[in-house]
Image (spheres, rainbow, N blue to C red):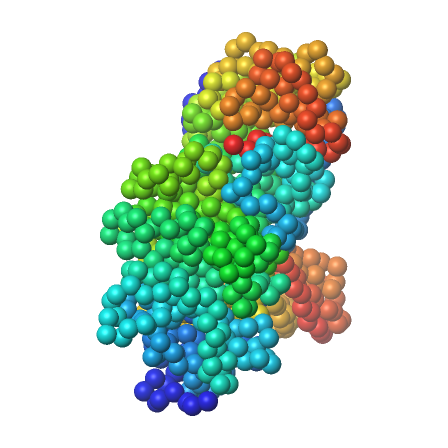
Amino acid sequence: MRWSNPHSKRARLVTLLRAAAVTAAILLLGGIVAVLLARPGSRAESAGSSLEPPTTAPPSTRAPQGARPKGPRLIFATAGGLRAAGDSGPPALLPGSGPGVAGPDVSPAGGRLAFSLRSHIWLSVVEGGGAIPLTDGAGFDHAPSWSPDGTQLAFDRRRRGERGYDVWVMGADGSRQRNLTGVRSGAAPDWSSQGPIAFQRAFGIWRMDADGAGQELLTGGFSGIELAPAFSPDGRTIAFAAFSRGGRRSDIWVMGAGGGRKRNLTLRSSVRGTAPAWSPDGRRIAFSAPSGIWVVSAEGTGLRNVVRGTGLSTPVWLP
Amino acid sequence: MAAVSPRRLACLLLAASAGSPGLGNAAPPRDELVASGLQVPTAFAILPDGRIAVAEHAGLVVALREGVAAPELLVDLRARVNNSRERGLVGLAADPGFAHNRALYVLYAYEDDPARPHAPKTVRLSRIDVRSGRERVVLSGIPADCRCHIGGSIRFATDGSLFVSTGDGARAGGANALALRAQDLDSPAGKLLRVSREGRGLRDNPFWNGDPWATRSKVWALGLRNPFRLALHPRSGVPWVGDVGWRAWEEIDVAGRGANLGWPCYEGAGRQGAYASTPTCQALYRRRGEHRGPLLSYRHGPRASVTGGDFARDGAYVYGDFTRGGLRLLGAPSRELAPAAAPVDIQFAPDGSLLYLSLTRGELRRIVAPASRPTVTAAAHPAVGALVLLSSSAPAEGGPYLYSWSFGDGAHSFSTEPSPPHAYAFAGTYVATVTVTDRRGRSARSSATVTVE
């Protein structure tokens, strides 16, 4: 199914009717979804308008950026803030984050970090050193994702007084905020290196052009509910999490950027993964699970628990 | 201290401050004059006694005091300052112990041969005792081969160390091999240095080699072009630097420990083609992950020159552009604050107000935000019989507001109407209360007594 311009009257009516239908259906699965989506901190909503910057460590505690033979490769959220994990050694707390942080994303050029904290989107650099709030309480904002040229961020927002999320886009300085989906149904956007944006809506994974046009359903609840799409670095494959009906399993799947054949990478495991993230070389996928951060190859081999612990979520790779 | 000659009498309007900046408010802030008549002012420092020390390009430092028309002369370095084009006295900071040691730190181009003012010079960081005028050179020999790109700012960290930003000192017409010094740890050009008050490199600096006097022991970050202004993040202590671009991008950089900010191999997030083929840049490109791109960049266009700014209490960051003019707020919601002319130094005062120096206008100015919280006063105006007109007044600049009236007789209204009529059913005395709420959810209330006969 492909939609025309979502802002035309007809499309909007269809959209609203469909949104109403899927909303009713969502309510049935609401309990299950609520449990499954309870990624620590990922939806920690706060009505406060305070924009206190996140806590940070003193600068002298960090290694020189220019001399890091084995720098941190993964960043992920914990109950206490963002952590960076190297290929070896214990994960170190990343300055520039704080409790309730989630959904980090590293800019294509590698230096900048966007994340959500207290329902705002923040901008920092990967080493920390202070962060700037880019959104200010017009809604509850999460899941930032960089545009391929690093000049924009997609994110999801639930406006105050509304029930559903939409996918929004803004400049990397917080300017020109605009709603791309407009039907209060769209979340967890991921911006492909090739231009389109994948997002979750109702039970499935959708894609659209970067201006919101051409919204198209890629998966429609084949497993129960599919969410957290992530484009591979070349933009040809989408990894996503699929929760089974009843919520007993959650697996990491891959499919083509236009949908099509789907493959379960964690079929032989009971790991219960979500929030997949591709390695920069496109060969591995990190994801979070109740037991920590895991990595699996894009072929489904080499499944490995790289960081053990509970309450770890939304990993992202450093270049 | 001698008063400055009447020729340059400053008009001082140090008015009561507006308190918290509240610059995220929707209403436009006001841009008001604090002092005028300054001669090409380049930098300022707020002294512990409330005076504001202002550095002038030619080599004077004067102090402005509230209610005093004539600025007081603190330092006269004119005989030692080369102020050819961008060279001059450009950086100023007060020692954290200024209240008892009266020490200022200044950064200026040193005139070693007045007969050849256009020849290559060097930049100095000096400590000046304003009581005796005695100068102690803390850093010297920072290249200023061109009459441009000499930096620089001086900022004290909370641990007492000094951050000093230096330019590449290289002429910018075309690609210039001197710009590559920004990548050389043994040159002080194009760096962010971190030193003790005496100018020693510090043991916890990223390139410390055991010799406190070695240049690389003093380097905190490298790869800068003209890091004219810097501020330290209030929580992390990490320097945020405005690095003036060449042809492509103006940068706001977060200069973490040991960060290589890329110049001249990179400008903005991308490679700078004019230098890309040099062995220095080729080697940097091979060291993947070493270059740290800017947090924020904007296109240089026909002309631009970023002026790194300062942090508001709420974590937002204000910066400016010297050649285009204007102050911008980075942080929700990002927007232009004021069309400031040639902002050359931007700092928040301890009371939260935002001060900036306009070089071309010779003025110290202040950005005053509208009241950060709504205020309201309720009043009752008996009309005919039991009909009472209630009114409330809230400052227009913070609006629009939602007005919630509780009339005291059990009736309520909830609207954007500040002055609703209300008819009381019975005679008596009532207390009517209005609560105003602005779009950020902040509220204020006021009550009025109503007597119905």
Q: Is residue A305 above or below residue B149?
A: above
Asked whether the viewer can see residue B282, the reply is yes
Q: Nearer the viewer, residue B189 or A264?
A: B189
Residue in the image at 44% along x and 23% along y: A214
Quadrant of res A317:
top right
B130 horizontally vs B325: left or right: right
Counting from the top left corner in percent of width and height, residue A297 is at: 60, 17
In this view, the residue in front, A181 or B165, is B165
Asked if residue B399 can be seen in this view, the reply is no
The location of residue A272, given as percent across then percent down, is 72, 21
What residue appears at the point 63 percent right and 30 percent down from the top-left corner? A87
Q: Quadrant of residue B453?
A: bottom right
Q: How many marks?
A: 0
Q: Is residue A315 above or below residue A271?
A: below
**Residue at the (61%, 63%) spot, across then down:** B158
Judged left or right of residue B104, residue B374 is right
Measured from the top left, where is residue B110 in percent x and y? 36, 70
Name the residue at the front extreme.
B211
Residue drawn at point x = 59 percent, y = 45 percent:
A63
- Seen in the image, is A204 located left or right of residue A27? left
Query: Residue B240 at what x, y percent from top left?
Result: 50, 54
